[in-house]
Structure formats: structure tokens, C-alpha cells
Amino acid sequence: MMLKHAHKKGQGMEFSIALFIMMVAMIIILAPFLLRAVRDITSGLGNNLATLSPVGNISMQHVSTATTNLWDFGMILGFIILTIVLFISAFMADIHPLFIIVYVILAFILFMIVPALNDTFIQIYATPEMYNETSHLPMTDYLGQHFGIIAFIIYIISGAIMFGKMRMRQQSYG
């Protein structure tokens, strides 16, 4: 017995702009806390290794330094991957007039929330207790400081992609 697919071709990869914005916000907010946890664990382990072997301590410091330097790149890579997935889903979304209305309403709601997210980023990244971590996250800090503008540009590009698909679809029927 064959089951009919509930979705048309290309609708299985829908990725909401709201989900995108929230995932990027979580990356920016969690980055210093996760880096602090990793640094605390590796520095504690390194101190304990120093009592056993100086070579082990040096190796652990090397691992800690490499992890710290890679952390910011990993956060930006996550942002880039989320952006690519958003654009792919914009290409694959089957446009319906109701979907465009929902898209505009979500844009309005999200851009009301973005200033609060920006304030949160600034407070976290300006906290003196987090300076050791946030000083190692310059790209993520830049993303957080310009989050509203970056989200707006990505929203406009994904909207243009969907509008282009809608126009192309109308021309193929007419």
C-alpha cells in the first residue's frame, strides 16, 4: 500500500526565519558561557596535571589555547550554516499568498524583539566577569552588536528570494 505524501515536492525543508533568528541569538548568548565552562574545565585539569607532570600541563595549555582560538570561528561557522539553510529553504518553499502575510507578520514581531536581544548581548559582553571569554570572541561580539542590521539584511534577501520564486511561478502559469 502506497502512502500519499502530505507535502508537495520541496516543502520538507522549511526553515522559519523566526527559528533562524532565535538560533543565532542562542549562539551569541551562549558562546561566552560555553567558552567559560570549557576554559574552567581545561584550566582545572591543567593545574591538576601540573602536579603530576610538567609536560602534561604544557600539553593541556596547548589544547586550551587551541580550543579558545577555535571557539569564535565555530560560532561564526554555525551562523553561516544557519544562513545557508535559511536561503535554501527560501528557494524550496512553495509560495502561497497566506505564507507571505505570515512572513511579514513574523518580521514585524521579530524586529520588535531584536532591540531587547541587542541589549542582552551588550550586557553579557560588557560584564567584567565575562571579559576573559568575550575578549576571545571578536567575530561573535561583532555579530551581536550588529544583530538587528544583519537580521534585517538576511530577512530582506530571503524575502527577495521568495518574491522572485513567486514571480517566476506566476510567469510560468501565464
Image (tube, rainbow, N blue to C red):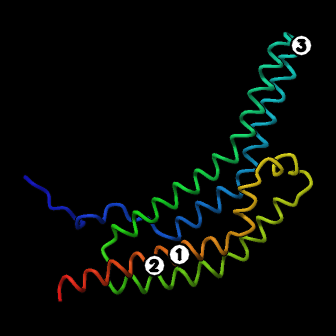
What amino acid type is highlighted by mark number 1? Tyr
Pointer 3 or 1: first along the chain: 3
Dot 2 amino acid type:
Gly
Q: Is residue 26 above or below residue 71?
A: below
Cα distance between the residues tagged 3 and 2: 58 Å
**Residue 159's disc number:** 2
Residue under pointer 3: 51
Check if mark 2's residue and mark 1's residue have beta carbons within 8 Å.
Answer: yes
Q: Label 1 neighbourhood size at 10 Å, few (<14), some (14-19), many (20+)?
A: many
- Check the image and name the residue furthest to the left: 1
Q: Name the residue: 72% across, 55% down.
A: 139
**Crowding near pointer 3: few (<14 within 10 Å), some, many (20+)?**
few
Question: Where is residue 72 shown, x and y percent of the image?
Answer: 70, 48
Left or right of 129 on screen, residue 35: left
Q: Which residue is mark 1?
A: 155
Residue displayed at 80% across by 15% down: 56
Which kind of residue does numbered mark 3 sit on? Thr
Q: Which one is in front in this view, the residue at disc 3 or the one at disc 1?
A: 1
Percent position of residue 26, x then y:
65, 58
- Image mark for residue 63: none
Q: Dot 3: what SS? A: helix
SS at mark 2? helix
